[in-house]
Amino acid sequence: MPQKLAAEFFGTFWLVFCGCGSAVLAAAFPEVGIGLLGVALAFGLTVVTMAYAVGRFSGGHFNPAVSVGMVVGGRMPASDLPGYIIAQVVGGIVAGAVLYVIASGQPGFSAGGFASNGYGELSPGKYSLLSGLLIEAVLTAFFIFIILATTTAKASAGFAPLAIGLTLTLIHLVSIPVTNTSVNPARSTGVALFAETGALGQLWLFWLAPIAGAAIGAVIWKAIYADE
């Protein structure tokens, strides 16, 4: 179990540090900023790289919603869930702290939203609470469905991390304007603690919607793949 939890800690750290770091440090860098497409790709690449690196130890969840989906889908015992979630959240917070220290080294630094998630005034496109709830739940449901489907015994061996990483990239391309894309409560928590906005007050949505969506996605997967 310690090996699994260490894998989840480091995997989630990498996801938050590089994914959110791309938004905080590189997205709007003058003349050569990577923009929305670059941030989306960065998040996808974090999952691909760490899934290959440590996925064999823990399953490569790096996300409390994914772990919930694995439990609902019958892929992981419920007794492992608390440890996974704690490791993921701590990894996300440590990554947020390290990223904050690095970003604050720039003259005139202001944390601002600090790549946090939000709705209403904290949404990049000022989308409503309902919009945020629906897009986070729907996209997480599909994310979990694809994770479960690509990691079955009959799926092409070795390609699951690529499919999962590309799915996360696609999810970001769709939802960054709406909520700045969560689908991961640990990612949301890790940066909300350092944002200079009301992100902490909206954090509940980015636990509720992804976890509900994950459970729905797992149930749909079980129904479609019942024969397997």
Image: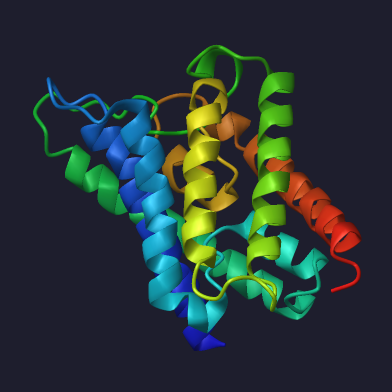
Q: How many marks?
A: 0
Q: Is residue 194 visible?
A: no
Q: Closest to the observer: 126 or 73?
A: 73
Q: Is residue 55 visible?
A: yes
State the image coordinates of residue 67 (x, y, percent, origin top left): 66, 64
Quarter of the figure with the N terminus: bottom right
User: What colouring does the structure picture have?
Assistant: rainbow
Q: Quadrant of residue 131?
A: top right
Residue 56 to residue 18: above or below: below
Which residue occupies 49% across, 35% down? Answer: 172
Is residue 22 or residue 191 the one in the foreground? 22
- Image position, residue 106 (x, y; %): 11, 33
User: Which corner quadrant holds the C terminus?
Assistant: bottom right
Task: Please determine whether, in this image, residue 83 is positioned above or below residue 101.
Answer: below
Whole-percent x, y for residue 2 in the image: 51, 86
What residue appears at the point 41 percent right and 38 percent down from the top-left corner? Answer: 40
Name of the residue lying farthest toward the left: 107
Q: Which of the 4 image quarters holds residue 85? A: bottom right
Whether 115 is drawn above or below 5: the answer is above
Name the residue located 90 percent from the left edge and 67 percent from the top edge.
226
Nearer to us in this view, 221 or 179: 221
Q: Is residue 151 above or below residue 182?
A: below
Left or right of residue 134, residue 166 in this image: left
